[in-house]
Image: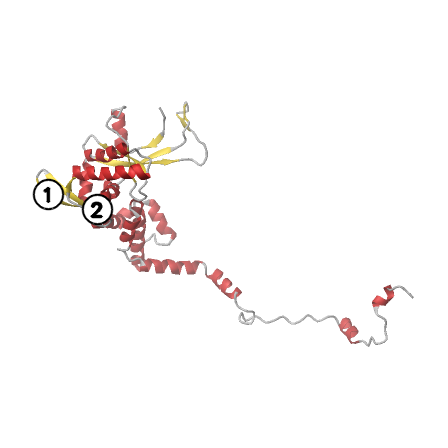
């Protein structure tokens, strides 16, 4: 059995520690929300009934590496597996889009079980034609998601829904609700209190001189936080959805500031390159005067050489 070094959330580690076999844990292969390529995910439910979904990412070294564990055991595979939480609403988006009769057109209202059945069939067709994922496996992976409470909550975030009665709720995927939900995510991440917790994002603003919320740059700093939050959320959105999301914000003040900052950083280079393209007269430079010879040389130039033999005549054969 292969051994991998992994970084796990504490809750998942407790589940594995409580049950070494962990029969309830099952990996699923689903389309990634941004690339639509098959990726590995791990849904799980904690002892308290809370559920979540983890994205499995492998960090591979540039060259062959091994892990030395406790100084006695060696793991030959040098990869590091990182399990990071992913918003189930973003994970469902590419799946639920398969329920649309045509791109951008709303589908029918269906119960969650019927909706996932329909999606799994569409995904099965895609798996048979454009991926190497077995059709039966793709179908089972989609249906497996219905076991988790977080999926039901995610459906309400990206779908229009109607409660027909206490036991029956029907759903229909809504692109607009997906964009609005992503917008709410961006606004939340861009708030100063939340944004300050992400050191990578804060360092990005510091490079542009926007780390401090200066009153004179307040609008620019706000737009910078929004753009950084957009870039972060875009990692889990399809390109067309991300384009719609980005168009909802005005970054004109930030773009103007960055353009001015770029000009201030490289003024000498621009002036030098512009001056190099001008003629010498337009540059304001004078032509250097021709260098004059010594006084003796000038007198020799004026000497009368009529009737004198040339120097080359001394090297010719005599007749």
Within 10 angstroms of label 2, few (less than 14), some, or many (20 or more) residues? few
What whole-number distance in Å separates the C-alpha atoms at marks 1 and 2? 23 Å
Which residue of the protein is positioned furthest toward the top in this rendering?
72
Q: Residue at x 35, y 58 (%)?
A: 255
Q: Position of residue 253 (x, y in %)?
A: 32, 60
For the residue pair 270 and 175, the one nearer the viewer reads as: 175
Residue 286 relative to residue 57: left or right: right
x and y percent of residue 27 in the render?
Answer: 28, 32
Which residue is label 2 attached to?
Answer: 101
Sequence-earlier tag: 1 or 2: 2
Colour scheme shown: secondary structure
Q: Which residue is mark 1?
A: 163
- Image coordinates for residue 279, horizontal then vertical, percent: 55, 69
Residue at horizontal 21%, vertical 43%?
A: 99
Q: Residues within 10 Å of mark 1 (few under 14, many from 20)?
A: few
- Residue at (44%, 31%) from the top-left corner? 65
């Amino acid at each position: 059995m292969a051994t991998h070094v992994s970084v796990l959330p504490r809750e998942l580690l407790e589940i594995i520690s409580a049950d070494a076999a962990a029969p309830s844990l099952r990996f699923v292969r689903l389309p990634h929300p941004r690339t639509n390529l098959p990726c590995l995910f791990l849904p799980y439910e904690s002892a308290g009934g809370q559920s979540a979904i983890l994205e499995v990412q492998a960090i591979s070294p540039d060259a062959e590496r091994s892990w030395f564990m406790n100084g006695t055991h060696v793991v030959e595979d040098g990869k590091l597996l990182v399990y990071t939480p992913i918003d189930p609403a973003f994970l469902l988006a590419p799946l639920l889009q398969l329920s649309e009769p045509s791109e951008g057109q709303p589908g029918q209202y269906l119960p969650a079980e019927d909706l996932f059945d329909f999606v799994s069939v569409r995904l099965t067709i895609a798996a048979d034609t454009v991926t190497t994922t077995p059709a039966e496996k793709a179908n089972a992976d989609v249906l497996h998601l219905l076991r988790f409470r977080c999926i039901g909550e995610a459906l309400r975030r990206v779908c229009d829904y109607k409660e027909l009665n206490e036991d029956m709720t029907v759903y229909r995927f809504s692109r607009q609700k997906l964009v609005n939900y992503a917008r709410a995510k961006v606004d939340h991440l861009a708030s100063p209190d939340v944004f300050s917790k992400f050191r990578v994002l804060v360092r990005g603003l510091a490079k542009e001189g926007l780390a401090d919320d200066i009153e004179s740059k307040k609008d620019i700093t706000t737009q910078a936080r929004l753009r950084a939050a957009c870039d972060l959320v875009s990692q889990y959105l399809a390109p067309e959805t991300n384009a719609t999301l980005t168009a909802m914000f005005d970054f004109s003040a930030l773009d103007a500031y960055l353009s001015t900052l770029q000009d201030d950083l490289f003024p000498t280079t621009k002036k030098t390159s512009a001056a190099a393209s001008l003629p010498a007269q337009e540059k304001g430079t004078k032509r250097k005067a021709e260098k004059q010879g010594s006084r003796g040389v000038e007198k020799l130039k004026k000497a009368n050489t009529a009737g004198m033999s040339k120097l080359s005549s001394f090297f010719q054969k005599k007749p």
